[in-house]
Image (cartoon, rainbow, N blue to C red):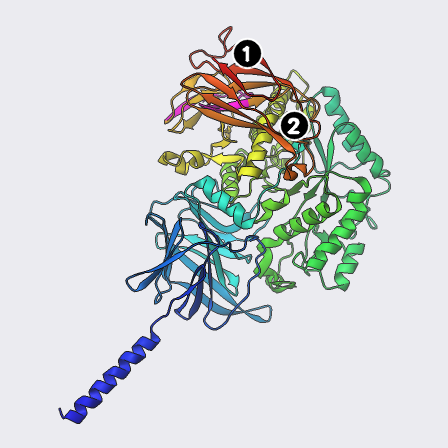
Amino acid sequence: MTFHNRTMLMFAIALLMVSARGSAQVVQQTKQGLKFSAQKLDIQIEFYSNNIIRIFKTPAGIPYTKKSLSVVKTAQPTVVTFSKKGKNSLVKSSEVQVEVNPETGGIIFYDSSGNLLLKDKDYGTQFSLVEDAGTNLYKVRNGFLLDKKEAIYGIGQVLDNKFNRRNSSHHMQNENMSTYSPYFQSIKGYAVFWDNYSISEFKDNPQELSFEGLGHCSDYYFMYGKHADGVISQVRDLTGKAPMLPLWAYGFFQSKERYHTQDESLSVLKKYRELKVPLDVVIQDWRYWPEYNKSDSAWNSQLFDAERFPDPKKWVNEIHQLNAKLLIVTWPGFGPKTEQRKEFDSKKMIINFDTWPPNSGARPYDVFNPEALDIYWRYLNKGIFSYIGNDGWWLDSTEPDHINIKKTDFNLPTYLGSYGSVKNAYSLMHNKGIATHQRAVNDNKRGVILTRSGFIGQQRYGSNTWSGDVGSTWDMLEKQIPAALNYTLMGIPNWNSDIGGFFAGRWKDGGGNKNPEFQELYVRWMQFGTFSPMMRSHGTDLPREIWNFGDRGTWCFDAQEKFINLRYKLLPYIYSTSWDVSHNDGTFMRPLMMDFAKDAKTHEIGNEYLFGRSILVAPVTKYKAKTWPVYLPEGSNWYNFWTNEYLQGGQVAITETPIDIVPLFVKSGSIIPFGPKVQYSTEKRWDNLEIRVYPGTDGEFVLYEDENDNYNYEKGKYSTITFKWDDRLKTLHIQAREGNFSGMLTTRKFNINVINPNQKLKDKHVNPTKEISYNGKKIELKF
């Protein structure tokens, strides 16, 4: 080779090297993260806090500004450090490390010690251009790699009787009885929220876990909490805290489809009072509004029929005089003869598909339009809230109902894009409009919303999601439990179901309410409802008021009354748990893996849970079950609530379950307050509480009190009394009261009952109480 040729060859090689260097992926450090391009994607990683990282991906060169409907947090100043790991880049906070591969787009999450948490797959994100309602959009897919045996939870309320969501696929489309959010939480102490509102697909198989839906971006948040409570705290930090509901919202609710007149619902309330069975709330279901020519074309006019509800103000006043509250239904759809529909039509704020009821011409309004939310509230406030002073809302059909479905319906326009691209957030926005407007009108009444759907972020509106129009079957009762637990693991604490199931027509031919099997199903469902965040009886086909099942002295009546009374006795515990939920990001229905993650058996158990932090509940879901197996997690010892029998954890206890007993076990170290027997939540003051202490380990409980139904607690108007049990010294420390509020008790009695683990409740003279007076100053009691 000549000198000239050698020179030209070396020059060519140099050019190739320069070219190669020029095409290498460049990772740019930002103030709190990284950004780079890979696989024709622009990728940004931003630490929102030490524990929360946002991953935002768009097609290369096509920027997009995203405004979240769920996320309320903005990036907070966070100290991060940068380094290299071979060809990869690392960015670390004090809690999480993120490694990026600039060639493949892969992202790996580690804890601060370098333990692998999750992999966002190499080459795992795809954007496929599609036409959506006449505009260009993408079908977006993001894939992740998990450990083979890693249990995950969340996804939503899925009625398939499964708890661990591994190796499952779900078409995430919010409808009656199906409530989804693109979210999963891992037993390893992290969660992922894929911030997308479209009808989506979730798939997990041995190759990967993936989300797929419509959008302009792949936008997700990785949250690390170390354990389930920590994860939920991060979810609430990101998407909003759960406010406290009023005390009355934890009492008993009675409803049915439907009370036809104001006198009918009043008579129900009066009969509960005559029978001295506790009740706090009656609910008014649909068609209280006027009918137009005996049709549903005036559906949801948010007005009262003059014949059936001639004096709605008087009606509500009488309910209040009987020391009860009223929830009233309102729907997102409007018939063509309503004033709301006419205004929404004129402003192009209707989504033009058929909603419930059939043959009515009803259509849903566009909840994604801020002006539409204002209009909806204007009518609702004038026609109902400021007119009659109701106490809360039943938001039915918040998916919304969709009938006579056409494929093209999902291409219909909304304020934020096609209906199919935002559908799953419909309930979130509908709840938002009513909750925020009500508070602006009346800041002295806590919002209470019963709703049939949900999405992450909805917890900040005081919403309680129910499981929908489920059938009255044993199989469906069994499915409620893991569905509820997965729903609450998304950080949304309030959930309930129709006690007895909604559709009960199958029992009509067998005697209806007097059918022994339906009676047993109803009682078992009520036992489950007693230990749900809302205890609410509702259904169609058969009436659900307690006297329809028999008279006092019959087993079905007496069993119901027993559990309604137990619910009210537990109100100090439940209301204090509500404070824990609001103040400490706690959870009402706690699957066993939350508190006993080290016990691998709990990772698969979805038919038991802790109600609050102390009471293990194992609902009976089989007909004629005389005994019930209950797994008592390792890591604690347990007391049978009914007998005080003391059992070691890590075993299955075969528990006797006559019809008036649901298996309940109390964790050792628990301190539980019991209130007085009452007919409604505020009938008696908590001036003489029983305090039960369950020894076996150290324990603590915070008794919370406030003004019961306003937002003054947000201004510090509340009090707490902390009880601490020292198990070694057998000493109860009652700390000095902290805080104050108007009407607070300054002196009271506590009846202290330290449970003796060596004797059963049936033994005579067991567990004598020690009565003490308490004036807010610290007390120490030796036992």
Dot 1 amino acid type: Lys
Residue 576 in sight: yes
Is residue 399 visible in the rendered image? The answer is no
Q: Which residues are magenta?
A: 651-672
**CA separation, marks 1 and 2?**
44 Å
Quadrant of the rendered image containing residue 410: bottom right
Q: Are marks 1 and 2 in contact (CB under 8 Å)?
A: no
Q: Nearer the viewer, mark 1 or mark 2?
A: 1
- Of 765 and 566, nearer the camera is 765
Element under disc 2: helix
Name which quarter of the figure residue 531 lies in.
Answer: top right
- In this image, 3 relative to 623: left or right? left
Is residue 149 part of the magenta span, yes or no? no
Of residues 497 and 773, the one nearer the viewer is 773
The residue pinned by badge 1 equals 770
Query: What label does residue 513 carry, if any?
Result: 2
